[in-house]
Each structure stands twice: as structure tokens, then as C-alpha cells.
Image (cartoon, coloured by chain):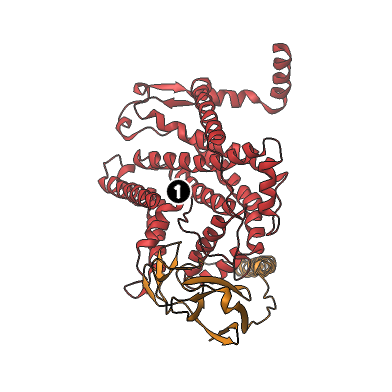
Chain colours: A orange, B red
Amino acid sequence: MKEHPGQEIQNKKRDFLKFILFGSATAWLASVIYPILAYLKPPKQAEVVVKSVKAGKISDFAKDTGTIIKFGSKPVLLIRNSSGEFKAFSATCTHLDCTVQYRNDFGLIWCACHNGKYDLNGRNVSGPPPRPLDAYNVTLQGDDILIHKS
Amino acid sequence: MNKIFTGVYHWMDDRFHLADAVDFMKKKYVPVHRHSIWYYFGGVSLFLFIIQVFTGILLLMYYKSGEEQAFESIHFIMSKVQFGWLIRSIHSWAANLFILAAMIHMFSVYFERAYRKPRELTWLTGMVMLLLAMGFGFSGYLLPWNELAFFATKVGTDIAGVLPIIGEPILQFLRGGEDVTGATLSRFFGLHVAVLPAIFTVFLSIHLLFVQMQGMSTPMHMQHLKEDEIKKMPFFPNFLLRDLLLWLIVLNVLAILAVYFPWELGKKADPFMSAPAGIKPEWYFLFMFQTLKFIPGHVLFIDGELFGILMFGLGGLLWMLVPFWDRKSTEGKKNKIVNYFGLFIVMFIITLTVIGWLS
């Protein structure tokens, strides 16, 4: 059926109105949703960048023990092995973010959440962890123990 | 008394045509057969949800959110507020029983094929509610800010973060930052007491509306029977009274559990402590938790945890969409795949839960 020329103009007008209507509805929706999403995204907070911390004195740490040290907002595991040597690793399990501990009965670093195990070099040796623990450097300054980011 | 009641009824009926609703109720029947018992679990879930709303509101009167106050306020509720220990214990126990009742309801609907046409959307709204219930469980678990909750939340939110592309924004959204902190507690509190209840109420209303509109499902083996050959019982008052009796029994069980096995508070969370040995999530997350323990660091070329999550996602999706892939049941034919898949899931959940429980 051939359309009446007036009808064609009508249709064009209608299409234009539809475009304006849906366009403005979308724009309106975006102008509502965007601020909400942006609001929900937590702002980056200026964190004091910690490069090193003083963990304590050598005598504070018995041999064959592990201690969680506050490194800025992150936990670090400081281990003093049976020969008296110090090592430090990020205490955050690479599997699902739990905090690991030193188990002197296993001679390993262990995560209680999913039974992940790391050796004393931080390498994942058993269980679900996919990566080794990040290592930190430990230096001794007189009697003080300093932990730095590698 | 009766006169007053009749008077009020007539006054209301004059304005809102209550007679229509009463007529509708009179026409509602519940089929009677050897599997009728399963009809009650939806009602039990509803009852436990109502208890959660009431006890939740009571807890809100004293609970304070925040890293420095949450644990202390629950301790205050449990030690200083009269019957505070009871209200909190009931809230914790009812949460668990609610998920249990909802799961029994879901499995019975699944094995009875009650999800088949025309009840596909009733099933879907029910599944959404179960997921929301788990969200309630997960968010509520953190609110006392104790050691177990802290690590459970770290693990749970980190699981979401493992997903490619959308994982990181979801993790940030849930935690309110990089780590689980007081910001996470505020968000979970908001989700637990405002967002989830609002969404849940909408789905619950739709679910109940569908059940009212379509009536109870009759089992497959009764499908060939004619309308007058099916044994039925009126919903009002017969079935409703039985429902209420069961609710009373559930309330008693709940009271016994809450009084004789009061819910522990545990130790306050400390972000600079190692996760304690023997850490476990709530029983309904235990099978997933145990599976994650068994999956090695890498499966094929992807991280083990991502592999686990994808498998659970896929299994859950298949389960949720059963009314749409099981066409045979709608046609009244037997579909053994549904049984095998269902039994596999049930066995998988039970086995891993038991292993998780014992280990």
C-alpha cells in the first residue's frame, strides 16, 4: 500500500519524537545512575607510604617463632628460624587473602583458611595458593630489626 | 466481642469488598498425597523470615556499627540487656534454620518437578530469594566484628575479586576499599538491614502472589487424574491451621536451640592476627569452602580459585534454569537427567559438607 505523502511526514515526525523521548530518557537515566555508581566507588585515601618499619629488638623474638608485624596497613610475617636468622614475607595468603602464620611443628608457613602451605622461602609448596608470598628484606641495625619492601 | 468483630468486618467489607477475598480463599485447595509434607516447608521458611525481621529490629535498638563499637555493642546486648542473649541467639539460630528450611523447600520442589510450566517464575523468584538469604547470612555474619567473621569476609569478598574484569570493582564495592575494614562493616550493615530486606520483600511478595494465583502444584504421578479424582483439603482453614501448628513446633525447637546452645560471640577481630586454626564458614558455605581447599593452585591454564568459582557459577546457573531445559517434565514425561543431576548435587553438597565439618 502506498503511503499518503502527509503520512510519511507524520511518521518522520513520530520517529523524531521517539528519538527525542528515548534519547532524553537514556540521558536522564545515565545522569541518575552515574553519580550513584561514582558514589559507591570508595575514594582513594592518601595513605602514608611505608617503606620500612622497625619490628623490635632481636631479643624480642625467640628462635623458631613467627610474629605478625604491622607494615602500614598490611600484615607482614617476621620469622626467626631455628638458626636465629630473620626472614619476612607478606602475611597475606596469595589464595584468598587470609593472614598466614608460622607453624614450627611443620617448619612451614601455613594458612588456616584453606590449608595452604609455603616453605620458609615463601614458596607455595602445597594446597591451593597459586603464587609465592611477597618477600620483604630484613636488616639488622645494631640490636634493632628493620623490615623493608623488596 | 463477636458483635464487634462482625461490625468491623461489615464496615471493611462495605469499603473494600472483603467478600471477594473470602470467596477466593474458599476456593483454594491443597492436594493431599504421600508427598504432601513438602508443601509445609515454604511456610516454615516464611515463618522463620518473619522471626528474623522481628528479632533483627530488636537487635537494631542496641547494635552499633563501626570497628570500635560493633563487637562491644553485641557484647553489651548479650551481657547487659535483659534477654539480649536470647534475642541474639534466636536471630542467629533462626538464620540457619531459615536457610535449612528454604533448602529443603527448594530440593522438594526440584525433585517433585513443581517448577515445570506454569511455575517457572515461581521457581526463579524462589532461587533469587535463596541467594538473597545467603547474602543476608554473609553480611550478617560480619556484623559482630569477630575473628571468624573477619576472615570469612576477607575470603568471601576475595572470591568475588577473582572474577575477571568485574571482580575488582565488585571487591571494592563490597569492601568499601582495598581491605576489610570498618568501611566494609558499614556497607555490610547497610546491605543487611536495608538493601537486602527491601529487595527480598519484593521477591517474596511476587513469589507468594504467584502461589496464590496458580495454587499448589500437583505431583507428576497425579497429573493424569481428573479434577474430581484428586484428594484435596481446603487451604482455609484446614491447611492453614496445620501450617500454624507446625510454626508453633518450629518456634519451640528454635527456643530450645537458642536457650541450650546459645550462639557464641568469639574473639574481637584483629587485622594483625593470623587466621586461627580450625576456621570454618557457616555450614551452608562449607561445601564451597571445602571444594576450594581441594582445588590445586592451577587447573589447566587458569588459577584454581577462578576455576572453582566458574564451576560453582555454572552449576548454580544450570540449577536455576532447570524449568527451561527440562522440557520433558512439562510434557508429563519422565526426565531421568533431572534426577541424576539433582542427586549428584545433593550428594556433592552432603559429602563435602561432612568432610568440611570433620576436618
Residue at left 69%, top 51%? B72
SS class, disc 1: helix
* In this view, B82 is above or below A52: above
Tell me where residue A2 appears, x and y as whole percent.
52, 67
Instruction: State the residue in front, B275 or B143.
Output: B275
Residue A92 visible in image: no
Indicate the quadrant where residue A11 lies: bottom right
Tell me where residue A41 appears, x and y as whole percent.
64, 69
Residue at left 59%, top 65%? B271
Instruction: State the residue in front, B106 or B100.
Output: B100
* In this view, B12 is above or below B343: above
Q: Chain of mark 1?
A: B
Mark 1 sits on what residue?
B283
Residue at left 26%, top 41%? B334
Is A95 left or right of B294, judged from the image as shown?
A: right
Give the residue type at disc 1: Trp
Instruction: State the residue in front, B112 or A16.
Output: B112
Instruction: State the residue in front, B225 or B200.
Output: B200
Tell me where residue B169 appears, x and y as whole percent.
57, 70
Residue A50 visible in image: yes
Residue at left 67%, top 35%? B83
Tell me where residue B141 appears, x and y as whole percent.
57, 52
